[in-house]
Amino acid sequence: MTREKKVENYDVVVIGGGPAGLTAAIYAGRARLSTLLIEKALIGGLATYTNTIENYSGFPNGPKGEYITNEMKKQAEEMGVKFKLTAVKSVDFEGTNKVVETFRNKYIAKTVIIATGGRPRTTGAQNEDKFLFDKGISFCATCDAAANTGKHVLVIGSGDAAIEEGMFLTKFADKVSVSVIHDEGKMDCNEIAKEAALANPKMDFYWNTVVDNFEGEDMLERVNLKNLKTKEIIPVVTDSCFEFIGYLPNTEIFEGLLKMSGNKYVITNERMETNYPGVFACGDVRDKWLKQVSTAVGDGAIAGFAAEKYIAETEQFEEVLMQTKKPGLIFVYNAIDPDSRKFLSTIDAYEKSKAGTIAVNRVDVYKSTGLADRLGVTNYPAVVITNEGQVSSIVYEGICEEGFCIETFDELFKTSCKVCK
């Protein structure tokens, strides 16, 4: 017998509990929106595994990533955010209300914020799982370089990220060894980076090699490389191993729904909006240049604010602008345009002359074009005439010019509005 899923309703459902998702939830919760955050594994995401974060503003003493993300979680809880530790099984973004389903529950939301992050591609070599993140294997030189000052580190990979991060590590480590799968002198990075790396006295290379296995007690002590041509096992004693062999976004569940890059990252605009109205994406799951805690937090702040704005605009659009009780006139303008501001007095005079028989509203696009977009307005200023909850006509010509007066509005209603004829 199939168990019926429990249904819960929220203003905002955040999928993913890393710094981006937590920040988005904090913003939504602070806006008094009912907010649920769903995380399948660990609240805090990959940042919790970082031993020291020295480049996150406001934390000068290099705390562990876990400390920072725990503080974020506490702050979200104080804002009334609810948490659910479970995996999302399916989503439906087609309707006005979005549907997010887990194994036992169905969550209905006005907006969804996707913050599922990503995961580093790993080698799959023996014992790798024992040393991931805080046990000797790292994936972020920016995060962990300073902790390797004066040490010997091994870099796996030869792409742009591997070589550029490897050179960055030489600013701290005494020696940086690089395992390259290709023949001597051949790398996957650009030529400028390759030449700089080969000339760097702190860098040496193991050509034609891959990782065979990792060794150590509590911490990583040795990486055994295998020469692909001779099959020789080469033991490399190292303090840390940095793997730069790619990154995989956690977007499988959204494939075929959201617009993505060739590498399966979600494409958004600067407001974190996806190709579905009311669905936002932020953090490392998004197609962007720099993936750090700081940029994830910035993304999350924008997404949380955008979700609040979307909900408010939806309510205003449906309940005020598209009201059905009387014909409507909507003046869409930009407050920084002097002529548009001056024309507001004409709008006020017309509203007064009609004594409540026509619903007159004003939409300022200075901070957001959301309502104008929903009305189908593409240029400003514009006058929108509505009837029975539908847009009857949009007028751009002559707005704010001499001769466009109260009588002109009457003519618009006569040609666009059945009630006024």
Image: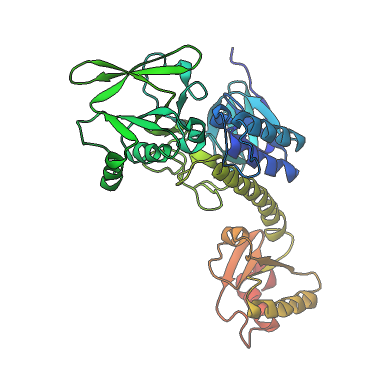
Residue 81, x across and y down, in percent: 72, 34
- Residue 420, image quadrant: bottom right
Q: Is residue 238 above or below residue 190?
A: above
- Residue at 68% over, 79% down: 343
The foreground one among 343 and 204 is 204
Picture layout, residue 235 above or below residue 108: above
Q: Is residue 244 visible?
A: no
Q: Is residue 406 visible?
A: yes
Along the viewing direction, whichever of 370 and 216 lies nearer the viewer: 216
Task: Give x and y (percent) for residue 264.
Answer: 41, 38
**Residue name at image x 66 percent, y 74 percent:** 421
218 to 98, vertically: above or below: above
Seen at 57% across and 43% down, the residue is 294
- Location of residue 403 (image quadrant): bottom right
In this figure, which colouring scheme has been used for the structure? Answer: rainbow
Most extreme residue toward the bottom is 402
- x, y percentage for residue 80? 75, 35
Total count of labels: 0
Q: Where residue 31 sits in the image (x, y, percent)?
A: 73, 46
Residue 75 vs 306, above or below: the answer is above
| Of 173 and 255, the residue lying toward us | 173
Q: Quadrant of the N terminus?
A: top right
User: Residue at (60%, 23%) from the top-left corner?
Assistant: 86
